[in-house]
Image (cartoon, rainbow, N blue to C red):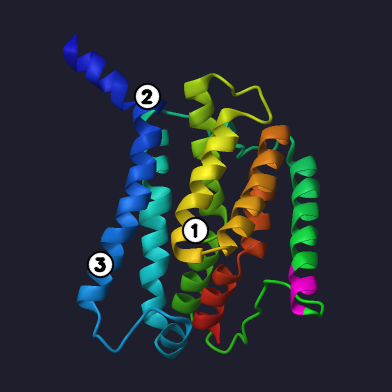
Amino acid sequence: MQLKARTSFLLSPKFQVPATWIWNAFGTLVVAAVVTLVLPRNIALDPSALTQQPSLALIPIFSEIILVGLLPIIFSILRRDKPAEYGITGKGLLMSLALSAGVVLVYFAYLSIRAGHLTTSVQLPGLHQLTVGNVLCAGLGLVAYGPLEVFFVVWLIHNTDRIFKTEANTWSWGLLLTIAIYGLLHSFSQGANALVIAAEMLALGLVFKSTRNSIGPMLAFMLMNGYAWFLAKVFLQ
């Protein structure tokens, strides 16, 4: 009986949501410390180093997969959640795509105003290194910093809503708390730009909550995340 109760708690959102946030926050610090110890002192994972040594770009890609996607996917499998619970479904797809396209256009307009000329976050690679391995790595970077990150946020929104029983609300506790924590954690590495990132995710979270479809937000965030396109460019230039 005690074992059954313990298993039930481990499979509950009340355990899984905090565990996912802790894994993400402290795992990031651990990975950063390990990378600092392993890499030579004259190498940092900045754009210049990644461009010169594309293999180094695998470090942030796999870190993102492990720290962002790993626990939500494992928890979902153990709990036998259906993909539709997280918006991976054909239902509501057209509205999800349309609303997400609007978010992308607003974001591109913001980038253009800030830059003083028409621009986007999409960096098209030169396509000079079209080997199977490079294409796969580029695709992995786009997926990790696009759809997977949105799945992470959607998973947290849905399961936080389970805790507060606010799944039916558009402006729910799950949405508000998840975006607040997401923005706070990004502020440590992104500074004031964390507000922009949080605003992006808030808009995409609202698309998910209103359409119950996350495919549009997944594609939209991939288009808006300049770092995802930078990684693809690194492998294909």
Q: Identify the amino acid type marked 3.
A: Ala
Question: Where does the image place residue 3, in percent across and percent down from the top left?
Answer: 18, 17
Q: How far, Cα to Cα, is label 1 from label 3?
A: 19 Å
N-terminal of the pair, mark 2 or mark 1, is 2
Question: Which residue is rendered at x = 75% and y = 78% of the image?
Answer: 115
Question: Where does the image place residue 237, in percent across and percent down from the top left?
Answer: 55, 87
- Spot the residue most to the top: 1
Q: Quick check: 235 above or below 95?
A: below
- Magenta-drawn stretch, dominant element (helix, strand or loop): helix
Residue 12 in the figure: left or right of residue 233? left
Foreground: 202 or 236? Answer: 202
Question: Where does the image place residue 231, in percent across and percent down from the top left?
Answer: 51, 75
Q: Which residue is mark 2?
A: 12
Q: Quick check: 229 above or below 54?
A: above
Q: Residue 70: which disc?
A: none
Mark 3 or mark 2, whichever is nearer to me: 3
- Which residues lie in the magenta part? 111-115
Q: Which residue is mark 1?
A: 187
Q: Identify the amino acid type marked 1.
A: Ser
Mark 2 is surrounded, within 10 Å at the Cα level, by few (under 14), some (14 to 19) or many (20 or more) other residues, namely some
Q: Is residue 153 rendered magenta in the image?
A: no
Mark 1 is surrounded, within 10 Å at the Cα level, by few (under 14), some (14 to 19) or many (20 or more) other residues, namely some
User: Would you say residue 147 is visible in this rendering?
Assistant: yes
Q: Residue 33: which disc?
A: 3
N-terminal of the pair, mark 3 or mark 2, is 2
Residue 40 in the figure: left or right of residue 192? left
Q: Is residue 114 rendered magenta in the image?
A: yes
Quarter holding the N terminus is top left
